[in-house]
Amino acid sequence: MSRTKTTQKEKAQLKIRCPECGSENILVDEEMGELVCGSCGLVITDDILDSRPERRAYTLEEKEDRQRTGRPTDYALFDKGLSTSITINKDVFGRSLSPMTKQKMWRLRRWHIRAQMHDKGRNLMQAMDELQRLSDKLNISQSVKETAAIIYRKALDLDLVRGRSIQAMIAASLYASCRLTGTPKSLDEISEVSLRDKKEISRCYRLIIRELGMNMPIHDPMGFLPLIADRAEVSGETLSLAARLLKKARERRLVMGKDPRGLAAAILYIACKLRGEKITQKQIAAAADVTEVTIRNRKRELLKRLEINLKNLSKPELLIS
């Protein structure tokens, strides 16, 4: 018996019969590596190979991450840039080349290297390595990374990367992906972990938006509330009150045209005052990565439009119900 995997189709073709009863009802026990007769129970062979993956996966993400041959959504090339290397000393049979042939092979190798340098695959490989680094620094999810990779590939197809930094273009693509997916990541956060400055990334971002004809949604301030509250160590009750306050501000159309991060910080500060939590504007501003002036301006407008008086409050929750 050959030491190869025997499938149901192969068994039907080979017409395997039980040597004891002559039955063709042969069962495969992959756990034990046995071929067993389904009629009389005779173990025909016990040395078949198990071709299943040696690593177990319990979720779809684990199954995709543990595939050896890569996934269709992999960002880098399958060979990681390790393309064919042309030698100039020996031929395919190992025989030494003549001086004339060596010169020809040297020229061929030179043009081969030049072609690699101008190939889009090399550019894409470097860009996806940078995307992976940025995503690890910012804890970006898989879906956001895939969207950023698609945006960068479209920019590469339109030749927008030529003459520009790969790091700046991939950072701009990641920021555009965060805007599209509603991920609360600001341009300042991305520029802090990027190798390029904020000015260059923002310029590349505007180029991508204009050339790809993308309509970018505005960040929802609600997405920044939990992040700022966690950094400022605000209680859950205050966070819940801030969410209700933000909902009220949205109903009165007070969020239009405002920086979502600054607006969320101001609302959280007001909620802290309503709940009596001792926290300063400086602490909230540091947690939200905005200035104290922004918080004061947004707070003043919100208090006026929502008709809240912080100096005379008995039951602040009733004002936001």
Image (spheres, grey):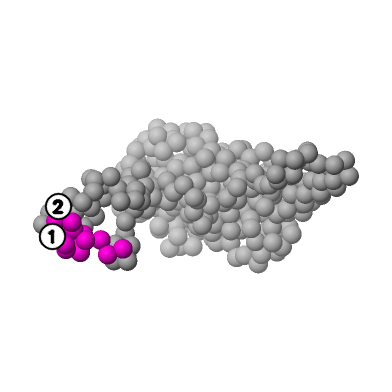
**Amino acid of disc 1:** Cys
- Relative to 102, is 64 above or below? below
Asked whether residue 143 appears in the rendered view, the answer is yes
Residue, x 10% and y 57% (percent of image)? 40
Q: In which quarter of the image is residue 176?
A: bottom right
Look at the image and say whether residue 247 sits in the magenta stretch.
no
- Cα separation, mark 1 vs mark 2, equals 9 Å
**Magenta highlight: main SS:** loop
Confirm or deny contact between disc 1 and disc 2 (CB under 8 A): yes
Magenta-tinted stretch:
14-26
Q: Is residue 34 left or right of residue 299?
A: left
Label 1: which residue? 21
Picture residue at 18% right of the left edge, 58% below the top: 18
- Name the residue carrying label 2: 42
Given residues 193 and 29, the one toward you in this image is 29
Residue 163: image x %, image y %? 79, 51
